Amino acid sequence: MPAIIKNEELELLRDTIHAAMPNGRSISELLDIDQLDYSRRTLQRRLESLVARGEIVARGHSRNIRYITPVFAPEKEHYYGNMLSEDGASYGNPSASSYRASRLEESHAPYSAAADDSWLSDGGLECKKLIARPLAERKAVGYRAEFLHDYQPNQSYYLDEATRAELAELGRVGLNDLPPGTYLRKLLDRMIIEISWNSSRLEGNTYSLLETERLMQHGLSHGGKSTAETQMLLNHKAAIEMLADPSDELGFNRYSLCNLHALLAENLLGEIGAGGRLRRVAVGIGQSVFRPLEIPQQIEENFQLVLEKAAAIDDPFEAAFFVLVQLPYLQPFADVNKRTSRLAANIPMVQHNLCPLSFVDVDTREYLNAVLAVYELNRVDYLRDLFIWAYKRSCTRYNAIRLTLGNPDPFQLKYREQIKNCVRELVQLGAHGEQAKALIAERASQLAPSHEEKSFGQIVAAELAALHVGSIVRYKLRPAEFAKWQSGRES
């Protein structure tokens, strides 16, 4: 009689494969995962069971078989060209947008949504159908300032009261009394990988989740990927580090938005100095009848108004969605506008210690078309439905991770800045061995009361030992400083 396979084992295996979409995993990759403690034959039997149940799909032949999520198992490839990826090409300036999406797979609705669009409201479905019409049937439109001007913070609402209350209930993580950013910092290593990967794949980035993890944690870029794709992911990492770093300046203001854009756009724009600077050139949106605003003074005025209105909104979810709508619509920067809006939408989540929005499992085509509905129709129904779906999905994902990690250590929260400063000093001084121990003891006596010196020193030593190239930004260390310190550790 064949052994009965427990559902929990199959679910763990299935979720591991789903987490690596769209590229899935091979048997060799699965065997390398510690949580899956199976022999090759046992693993093959479980994979066969999941395939038979339709929960995963096998692609390839012999040793090249990969197991992938069904919605990312296309029968054919679909080429979008430069449709919204990135935001637009500057007229007369081909180098202004050096990164363009290459190939996107034929896609479907958000991962767990039904193929019949049941996740969409009536208004969202109507917008989807209107945007699906051929370009020739869609009316050319320009930027309408009244779409922004008519919105009145805390009087106008894109999200109704019931939706805001539901999302607030889902997003609470029990850390409201702790400093802003506590939740994001608690899960930082995992969230950097997942948020960076999900946001980047919406721009056509072809790195897999596993490849992204290797890049973020070990600095290993994939030889078969473009440098632009690698740069895009590393830029996301730096931008998320900025959001997680406690700062009174973080908010819907010029400093935060422009610096967020500068980090996301580093080395991806053809013009030096374009990162973080409002555009001075006209841009166009590929595969759209929408023509963005062109006059620099008007771009400046409306950008300031977007910031003022966003900052005035009390509800964090309304503020997040407002930025997702209005920032890409204005196209204030020469490029990288959608990416900036997606990370900026997490500013109120950081400020209120809410679960972040990561766009986990959101389908690329659905997102792009929902943004098009804002551009061409000035309607938010489609994007709102996707936002709600995506945030619920993010909460399910990250609250499960949080439970496995437990609550933040109050001691580490209390001394978080002192600990980071001490680690940075040790690295910059090239301290190792006895020298490091002596310096840690000295700093512990200076920075913590006598009954907490030992704990302080132990945490600093542990963080120093765990330091790797993927975590140095949080300590404000440069790669060259870390490399020099690491070479001394290995000698």
Image (tube, grey):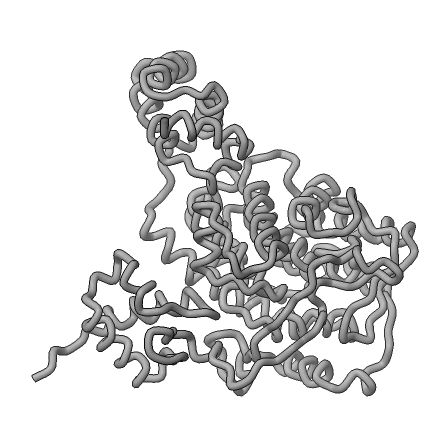
The image shows residue 4, relative to residue 214, as above or below, that is below
Image point (41%, 74%), residue name: 68
Q: Quadrant of the C terminus?
A: top left
Query: Which of the pair 69/120 is nearer the observer?
Result: 69
Q: Residue 17: x, y in percent?
A: 37, 69
Query: Which of the pair 136/162 is nearer the observer?
Result: 136
The image shows residue 73, relative to residue 158, as above or below, that is below
Is residue 165 something one can see in this rendering?
Answer: no
Residue 144 image-quadrant placement: bottom right
In the rendered image, the residue lying farthest to the left is 1
Q: Residue 275: x, y in percent?
A: 74, 46
Q: Residue 116: x, y in percent?
A: 53, 87
The image shows residue 455, relative to residue 112, as above or below, that is above
Q: Is residue 352 left or right of residue 93?
A: left
Q: Is residue 262 left or right of residue 214?
A: right
Image point (40%, 56%), residue name: 399
Image point (38%, 32%), residue name: 463
